[in-house]
Image (spheres, grey):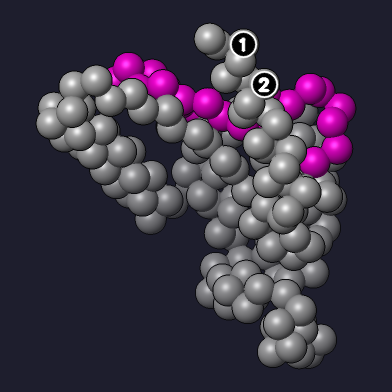
Amino acid sequence: PEIVDSANRDVINPWEVSLALANPNYYDDLYNLRSEWSKRSVECLLDNIIANTRAISKEHPNTEFLIIGIPDKFYWSENSHASTVKEYQSIGYRFEPNYNSKDIKNNPLSILVSNTLQSKEIEYIYLPDLIVPGTETYNWFYYRDMHINNKGNQMVTRLLKKHMKIKQ
């Protein structure tokens, strides 16, 4: 098929194709915490963040931490969600048709991470919260790939610099 040929030619990330084949519901399962593997993996990540920040803080008491949540491109805005769903369905992923895209940034995964880190007094920024509503973020990412491209890295840098200036 065309998708396998694209992966073989390095036109698309072969990892995305293999993940779609192995678990077509991967992104829905992960962000909605609908499966045991997704719940366990996120809990493990959070346990590690908490343990590591505590260990480093104990050894170096003046160290400050800032955890930055950078979600996959589905979860930056309503626009990016709709276009990315179409893009990723062409690779083989499946998505729940009735997913509430009106509140796309408040998915169960992001809420759990934010609430857990706040409860442990670990500073956390969820990058989509820094974006002005209506900002087009789709072109901040590679096509058929969840990674931020050069333009996206530049825009994220601007957002974080602006945020840091406001906080000081």
Residue 94 included in the magenta stretch of the image: no
Height in image: 85 above or below 49?
Answer: below
Residue 151, given in percent of the width and then of the height, sits at 77, 49
Q: Amino acid at mark 2?
A: Lys
C-alpha separation, residue under disc 2 versus residue under disc 1:
6 Å
Q: Callout 1: helix, strand or loop?
A: helix
Whether tag 2 and tag 1 are in contact, CB under 8 A, the answer is yes
Height in image: 118 above or below 135?
Answer: above
Tag shown at residue 162: 2
For mark 1, what is the residue? 166
Q: Residues within 10 Å of mark 1 (few under 14, many from 20)?
A: few
Of 58 and 15, the residue lying toward us: 58
Q: Residues within 10 Å of mark 2 (few under 14, many from 20)?
A: few
Residue, x 42% and y 28% (percent of image)? 66
Residue, x 71% and y 82% (percent of image)? 10
On screen, residue 54 versus residue 138, left or right, reads left
Height in image: 163 above or below 79?
Answer: above
Of 26 and 158, the residue lying toward us: 158
Q: Callout 2: helix, strand or loop?
A: helix
Q: The magenta stretch spans which residues?
A: 111-137
Residue 23, given in percent of the width and then of the height, sits at 55, 68
